[in-house]
Image: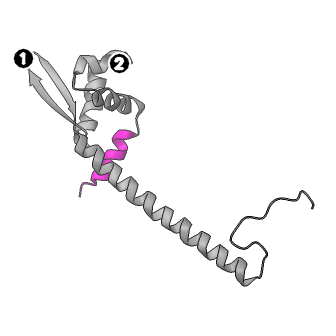
Amino acid sequence: MRDDLSLKFTALAHPVRRAMLEHLARGSATVGELAGPFGISAPAVSSHLKVLEEAGFVDRTVEAQHRRVSLRHAALAETETWISELRSFWGQGYDRLEARLLEIRKQLGRPGAGRPRPETGEG
């Protein structure tokens, strides 16, 4: 079974691929335009593009003599949705933890329960 999320994060793990995606966020580009800033070989560029394509981040098309690459925004949105859901889960967990800690402070009869106590510097 192919794990799409793992493919996406593997693709995002390499700085050259992330830079290529940043470039493509401004508009489609030729393979040569994508290779330019990195000074890497054509086979290396092709390899990076293959990883991005397999992850669903880019589409490649042929226009006359040029191969154009364009960003698939939907693939980025899918990844962002997963991250947002995870962030929401952790945020709720922290909210529950904070509420429980406040409850414990109240049960212990601590003064100022519900708000942090100022540091006195005494010890």
Give the quarter of the image for residue 74. top left
Q: Residue furthest right?
A: 122
**Between discs 1 and 2, the one toward the N terminus:** 2
- Tell me the residue at 32%/45% (across/down): 8
- The image position of residue 65, as x and y in percent, is 10, 15
Q: Secondary structure at mark 1?
A: loop
Q: Please provide percent x and percent y for residue 76.
A: 29, 44
Q: How is the image coloured?
A: one colour
Quadrant holding the N terminus: bottom left
The answer to whether residue 39 is above or below residue 72 is above
Q: For the stretch drawn in magenta, what is the main secondary structure?
A: helix
**Which residue, given by chain and number where applicable, does mark 2 sit on?**
40
Residue positioned 77% across, 82% down in the render: 109
Residue 56, visible in the rendered structure: no
Left or right: where does residue 116 sit relative to residue 28? Answer: right
Residue underneath mark 1: 64
**Image quadrant in which the C terminus is located:** bottom right
Of badges 1 and 2, the one in the foreground is: 1
- The outermost residue toward the bottom is 107
Amino acid type, residue under disc 1 in the picture: Ala
In the image, residue 110 sits, relative to residue 15, either above or below, namely below
Magenta span covers which residues?
1-12
Q: Say which mark, if any, is on residue 21.
A: none
Image position, residue 57 (x, y; %): 25, 39
The picture quadrant where one finds residue 36 is top left
Q: Residue at image x 24%, y 40%?
A: 73
Q: Residue at x 55, y 67 (%)?
A: 95
Visible residue check, residue 108:
yes
